[in-house]
Image (spheres, helix red, strand yellow):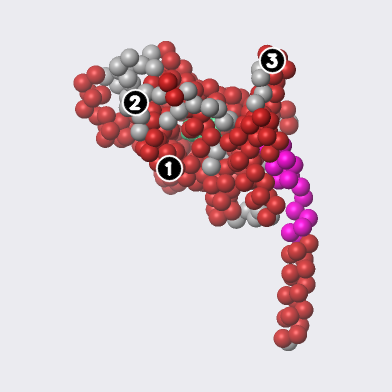
Amino acid sequence: MGVEKVSVAFKLYCLTVMTVVAAAYTVAMRYTRTASSGDLYFSTTAVCITEVFKLLLSTGMLAKESGSLTKLVSTIKEHVFCNPRELLKLSVPSIVYAIQNNMAFLALSNLDAAIYQVTYQLKIPCTALCMVLMLRRTLSRLQWFAIAMLCGGVMLVQWKPIDATKVPVEQNPFVGFMAIAIAVLCSGFAGVYFEKVLKSSDTSLWVRNIQMYISGIVITMLAVLLNDGQKVVEKGFFFGYTPYVCFVVFLASVGGLYTSVVVKYTDNIMKGFSAAAAIVLSTVASVVLFGLHITTTFASGAILVCVSIYLYGLPKQDTSKLSVKDSEQEAKQKLISV
Ligand code: NCC
């Protein structure tokens, strides 16, 4: 059940692509939800079609991994068609991700992309809590402190003043914030659940993805029917699809696959830390390459991010010393009581 070893360079590459795609995805999604002149596409269909693309891409990756068509067919038969129990297991994160992905559209239809990015960082402590509760990971007090510091740091790094003149009137910020709260909880839970299933057996990442995306298609299709069924029948599934909408679907598909690779080779907390580092590094690179101006908020956020990474990575010396002392005391007390 050991995780296959890959080079640090490959991990960095995956993390950077994931972070760049995620940033582009949020901005592009917000643009398609607010810049349209009336023929607004149904967001439920975009979430659904993304699952289809991810299924196709994962099947392609599994074909590459299998090496032959016969092996591919037998693997799919064994793990998908003859294994309803595993399909059911993977339908749990699938449902939660379906809710999360729909909530992201709702939030970005009601909130500015910058506000969304900043608030969404609450997923970092939420994910850490899920890791502790679901994977029984232990985190020292210092690591919890580092996580809180990281969360604050990324919020500052992404902080941008809002241009009030550009805010469309029909937005409902309350709905937007509620959608983010739900998305934050879903991201933490589904991410850790998927990691637990992935790392508890030797089953290939692409098989796990295929199992998850199959139920994902069914669930997101249900969401299309329940939410926009009548309108989709009248206007068509792809109503309002512009090249920008297709680009959003493309980014969501590629971003989802890179997320799964990152979780495979690191973990969900590392995903948060590395994404934050990538945001800081890419901005610093823009300063060097394009002469971008750095604000005080960005600089203070970047310092917090760097310090939090250092603190999180420190060996758990203090706590282990404490626990040794604790256990010595416990042993002494036991001896006394005997
Ligand atoms: O919120 P986040 O990720 O945790 O959401 C994970 C996204 O990855 C997809 N996924 C996950 C596991 C898996 N095996 N396959 C997948 O396709 C899920 O469907 C879900 O969409 C982040 O940590 O900030 C991150 O954020 C998302 C996205 O920006 C937000 O959810 C905002 O809507 C990024 N997704 C994309 O860029 C498409 C993700 O890369 C990183």
Q: Nearer the viewer, residue 184 or 62?
A: 184
Q: Magenta segment range?
A: 305-320
Which residue corresponds to mark 1? 182
Q: Position of residue 61 (x, y in %)?
A: 55, 26
Name the element at disc 1: helix
* Pointer 3 or 2: first along the chain: 2
How far apart are the alpha carbons under marks 1 and 2? 24 Å
Which circle marks residue 81 in the picture?
none
Label 1 or label 2, whichever lies nearer to me, is 2
Label 2 CA crowd tier, 10 Å (few <14, some 14–19, many 20+): few
The type of residue carrying mark 3 is Gly
- Give the prevailing secondary structure in the magenta stretch: helix
Which residue corresponds to mark 2? 169
Q: Residue at x 75, y 53 (%)?
A: 316
Name the element at disc 2: loop
Q: Nearer the viewer, residue 236 or 144?
A: 144
Q: Position of residue 328 (x, y in %)?
A: 78, 72
Q: Residue at x 39, y 17 (%)?
A: 35
Rendered view: 217 above or below 314: above
Which residue corresponds to mark 3? 291
Label 1 CA crowd tier, 10 Å (few <14, some 14–19, many 20+): some
The yes-or-no answer for disc 2 within 8 Å of ligand 1 is no
Rendered view: 90 above or below 317: above
The type of residue carrying mark 1 is Ile
